[in-house]
Image (tube, helix red, strand yellow):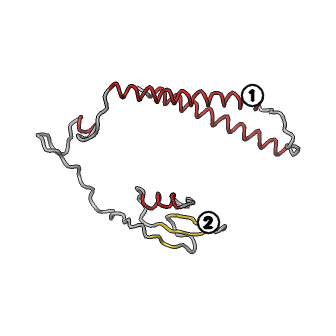
């Protein structure tokens, strides 16, 4: 998390009280006077006391507690490895309904992305989009063409990811 700028109190609290492996956080000011929260000291920064101290590197990691039973503590049963005993179970009917809802939502997102891609390709016009009135400068036109090309690539990747995610639903 080196040199990531967070603006606002919500981001600061998420950083300070979230599950972070960082032991020290500094509050600095950037060139515009906005606060910069980072894990490395850059210039005149103020150390923030997060109340979190990382465990020493040599501290052993405790083994999981066994729930009793006849098996050895080092080799949990396959059922115990997949879900803890107190973990809530979902009925198959409920899970199928959730999967269908997820499939519907992803399908809607896929249709939106496909429509967006069709519109972008139409506007892109095989690399020669129509020049707009504010593009008298050729560099502006080229920047818009490059931006369209990037947006098309990003949308294609989104479509691939959505199709892959839909394929992964049971």
Q: Nearer the viewer, residue 1 or 47?
A: 47
Q: For the residue labelled by badge 2, is the local secondary structure a helix, a strand or a loop? A: loop
Q: Is residue 116 above or below residue 55?
A: above
Which disc number belongs to residue 84?
A: none
**Labelled pair 2, 1 in contact (Cβ < 8 Å):** no
For label 1, the crowd category at 10 Å Cα-Cα, with few meaning under 14, some 14 to 19 and many 20 or more, is few
Count the labels in the image: 2
Residue 21 place in picture, x, y as percent: 41, 59
User: Along the polypeptide, which appears first: circle 2 or circle 1?
Assistant: 2
The reply, left or right, for residue 136 in relation to residue 8 is: right
Q: Residue furthest bottom?
A: 44
Q: For the residue labelled by badge 1, is the local secondary structure a helix, a strand or a loop? A: helix
Quarter of image, res 17: bottom left
Quarter of image, res 7: bottom right
Q: Nearer the viewer, residue 93 or 161?
A: 93
For the residues labelled 2 and 1, the Cα–Cα distance comes to 42 Å
Residue 167 place in picture, x, y as percent: 47, 26
Q: Is residue 4 above or below residue 151?
A: below
Label 2 belongs to which residue?
A: 34
Residue 44 place in picture, x, y as percent: 57, 75
Residue 1 place in picture, x, y as percent: 50, 58
Q: Is residue 93 above or below residue 143?
A: above
Write the residue at 51% across / 66% down.
Answer: 40
Write the residue at 33% across / 62% down.
Answer: 57
In which quadrant will I find the C terminus? top left
Which disc number belongs to residue 122?
A: 1
Which label sits in the foreground, 2 or 1? 2
Write the residue at 47% across / 66% down.
Answer: 25
Write the residue at 36% across / 63% down.
Answer: 54
Quarter of image, res 28: bottom right
């Amino acid at each position: 998390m080196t040199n990531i700028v967070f603006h606002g109190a919500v981001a600061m609290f998420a950083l300070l009280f979230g599950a972070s492996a960082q032991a020290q956080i500094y509050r600095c000011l950037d060139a515009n006077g906005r606060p910069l929260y980072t894990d490395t000291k850059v210039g005149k920064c103020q150390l923030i006391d997060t109340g979190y101290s990382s465990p020493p590197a040599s501290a052993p990691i405790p083994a999981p507690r066994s729930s009793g039973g006849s098996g050895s503590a080092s080799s949990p049963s396959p059922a115990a490895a997949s879900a803890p005993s107190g973990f809530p179970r979902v009925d198959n009917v409920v899970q199928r309904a959730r999967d269908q809802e997820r499939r519907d939502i992803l399908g809607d997102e896929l249709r939106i992305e496909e429509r967006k891609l069709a519109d972008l390709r139409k506007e892109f016009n095989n690399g020669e989009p129509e020049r707009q009135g504010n593009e008298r400068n050729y560099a502006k036109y080229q920047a818009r063409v490059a931006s369209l090309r990037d947006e098309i690539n990003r949308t294609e990747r989104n479509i691939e990811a959505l199709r892959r995610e839909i394929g992964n639903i049971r």
